[in-house]
Amino acid sequence: MIQRLFILLTLLLGVLSATPQATAVDGTVRDIRIGQHPDKIRFVMDLSQDLDFTVFSLADPYRVVIDLPEVSFAPGAGPDERRPAEIKGFRFGLFRPGTSRLVIDTAKPFSVAAAFMLPAKAGYGPRIVIDLKPTSRAAFLEESQKSVAAFQANKRPRLTAPEPAVPPLLNRPPRLANEKIIVAIDAGHGGVDPGAIGVSGIYEKNIVLNAARILRKELERTGRYEVILTRDSDVFLRLRERIAIARRAGADLFLSLHADSIPNRKLRGASIYTLSETASDKEASLLAENENKSDIIAGMDFGTETPEVTSILIDLAQRETMNHSARFAGMLVREMRGEVKLLKTAHRFAGFAVLKAPDIPSVLIELGFLSNNHDEKLLRSNAHLTRVAASLRRAIDDYFDLVQSAARAN
Ligand SMILES: [Zn+2]
């Protein structure tokens, strides 16, 4: 549908503006994405190069218009079917010689809350990011008079930070066939922090360290993985340090191992956690204010940037990472089911601090309940932990098969 409109528009305008200069193209829009966030709709255009742009909104019907220099649109560029309900339609093409235009038809009035040109950086190509927030008709009408000038004056904030020392983990070329995939295994707790205490008196910190070592052996046996443990002894580590160790090692995946304890001693089964959307959005804004923000995405230096740009960058990386984490969690549930007793809702979401590396897909695995007699006995058994490790390894294999084949297809 979009393509047909685009072709029609191109043909029509091509006829109307058939001048020798009409073929001049200033760049390519490689992809267009629309994401639903709790408080806004984010619109991202992946570009071949930095481009000036103008954004403004029009009423009756409501629409947001983005004007660019004359660009070509990559075949297939455009949001997929899962666009937010408020976005009724989407059109793009040549508007007149020298100007290409994108029009987003919205069901309700939206205001342009932010608009940025993010130059290529750390493996990400240049992008235009536009945030739309719902607004009232009255506010919309007032703002739409002013918005052209406002965003023309503010367009193209520059990211002037030096190139990062560490390449980003996402959107980078896949590891070569002879290159090992790096998996970080994080045994929870340690040292002064025993974690949960089992019915027999055993400590969570010891059970998860044993499980981490068994999993390391299982993964290294394949020759495909290099494994790093955040701790390989009974030491205390802050959550932030655990993430830092994984990031320094260039980890492709982060697994935090735990074993739970609750007052209900009957409950048993393993579960898998990934970071929840709402928790991570809050975290994204907190991270932006944080003094350690310079190191948070692949060593980028945000020192010269506004908090808003920083938070957008972190948010974009985190969002992509959360999708990867959730996909991996799904594979993990599939591989573990049948091997290990799982909670009824096996994949859960929560704001665990240890899952908040914005650029490493991360899951936290609760291996079972130390408050339950049966689970505790299993968790003390190397045979059981070896079975768990084998199902984790199969899920990790599946996940990286997918990641690598997707990368090859691009
Ligand atoms: Zn724990």
Image: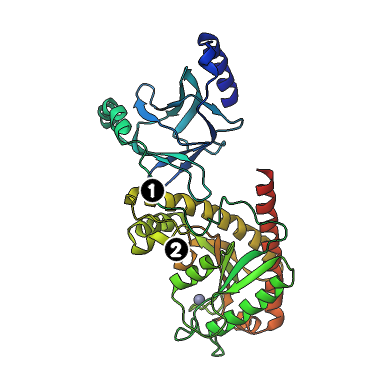
Residue that carries the numbered disc 1 in the rendered image: 160
Does residue 43 show up?
A: no
Q: Amino acid at mark 1?
A: Thr
* x then y, percent, for residue 169: 55, 57
* x then y, percent, for residue 409: 68, 44
Left or right of 124, for residue 144:
left
> With respect to residue 392, does 235 lie above or below?
below
Give the position of the C terminus as an image quadrant. Answer: top right
Q: Secondary structure at mark 1?
A: loop
Q: Secondary structure at mark 2?
A: loop
Q: Tag on residue 351?
A: 2
Give the position of the N terminus as an image quadrant. Answer: top right
The mark nearer the N terminus, 1 or 2, is 1
Q: Amino acid at mark 2?
A: Gly
Which of 145 and 351 lies nearest the eye of the viewer?
145
> With respect to residue 367, does 382 lie above or below?
below
Tell me which residue sits at (70%, 58%) in the image: 398
* x then y, percent, for residue 198: 54, 85
